[in-house]
Amino acid sequence: MRGKTGGSLTTEEKPIVKALLNRGITGQDIQNTINIGRKAPVNSGRISAVKTSTITPASDAEVEAYLYKKNSYDLQTGLNIVDDERIIKSREAMFLAVNLFNTPHLKFKAEGFSVYATIAWTYLVHEYCSRNNIPFEDKHGRTATLCVLIKKQELKLSPGIIKNLEALKEIRDAVEHRITGNSDANWYSIFQACCLNYDATLVAWFGTKVSLQKNLSFALQFAKLSIPQIASIQNFNVPPRILALDARLNKDLPLDQEDIEYRLKVIYTLDKVSKSEANVHFVSPSSSAGQEIHNILLHERLADDLYPFKAKPVQEAVQKSVKIIFNMNSHTRAWKKYKIRPLSKDKKPENTNKKYCVYNKAHKDYTYNQSWINFLISEINKGEFF
């Protein structure tokens, strides 16, 4: 019974084993070679059975081809250059796309990224089609374009992924061999989504072992720039043709229908906190917290919108809702009591409690939001403020 456990040798493997035995290679070494990349390993009994059989040994050429294949396995991913060439090329193309983008001394990255990322996706789709008997070549061996293939229902790609890849093609066609100015930053969100979509699809189609996550944690670098710097360079020296492309890519995407598979946007708020409070919090877009953040980010963007009240309107709004006298002196005592902003001569006037107040550098004054008004009214009505 012991000799019957484990996987069976295939009709291809038996002549190979016979030939290796004839070369004087030990059964243990042959067993180790045969089991490389195998889902169901064979045991020594299978090798011994071939030794006493009348099987015709494989030719030297067949043995060398088999050994080349076995020695070409990547033990981390399980991929083999003979059987998985398209997947290997696909992963390498995405590595090249990301590494090119992350190289700090390169100035024009959109062209290289869009080309290599398109190659990565093309190999990925071709391999999936090949393994699932989905036609992707004509009778002359010419393959359909990526934008045609991704719309095949058999691939089951989401509308967001399809739109992202269509945008990638438009970007590639628009920037190839042309002057693009400072346009790369316009498409960071599309490129980032492309990377994440690629890895998710790669894993869904070919398993977790081939994922790029261990090699590429954050796919695209985040430049360490201040908010004013980012705002000032965003559209600097961008040719009109590229601006027209951006308008075309976004024309059918209302703000309330953003799709993170089309373009990924990460919003950071910069607040001064103690070391113990320094955290990055991630929430699911579909959760109640995620929906609330989504709505705030979409509809309340500018400081003037978020913090529209100067001190006088705050004082007047509070006075209308409370029974005590609440004048400008009362408001001054309030922001000092609750420490929502620094004193007037403080060297860092921007160190405010962003929950209620921000410093307006252009006007050199402070503005407040509705939450501050509501908070004061609540505190006064509870008898907490004197």
Image (tube, helix red, strand yellow):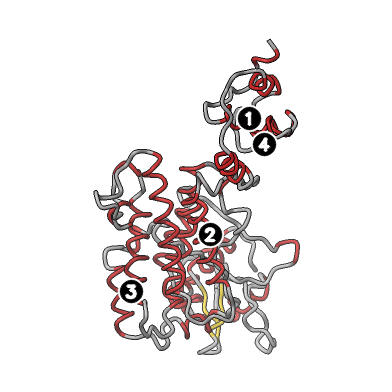
Residue that sits furthest to the left in the current view: 139
44 over 208 or under it: above or below: above
Which one is closest to the eye, mark 3 or mark 1? 1
Disc nearer the start of the sequence (2/3): 2
Of the numbered discs 3 and 1, the one sitting upstream in the chain is 1
In the image, taking residue 363 as reference, residue 31 lies left or right, namely right
Residue at screen point 45% across, 58% down: 120
Of 158 and 176, the residue lying toward us = 176
Is the residue under label 3 in contact with that under label 2 (CB below 8 Å)? no
Q: Earlier in the sequence, mark 2 or mark 4?
A: 4
Identify residue for label 4: 33
Q: Residues within 10 Å of mark 3 (few under 14, many from 20)?
A: some
Tell me the CA gap for discs 2 and 3: 29 Å
Residue on which disc 2 sits: 92
Residue that mark 1 sits on: 17
Depth check, mark 4 against mark 3: the one in front is 4
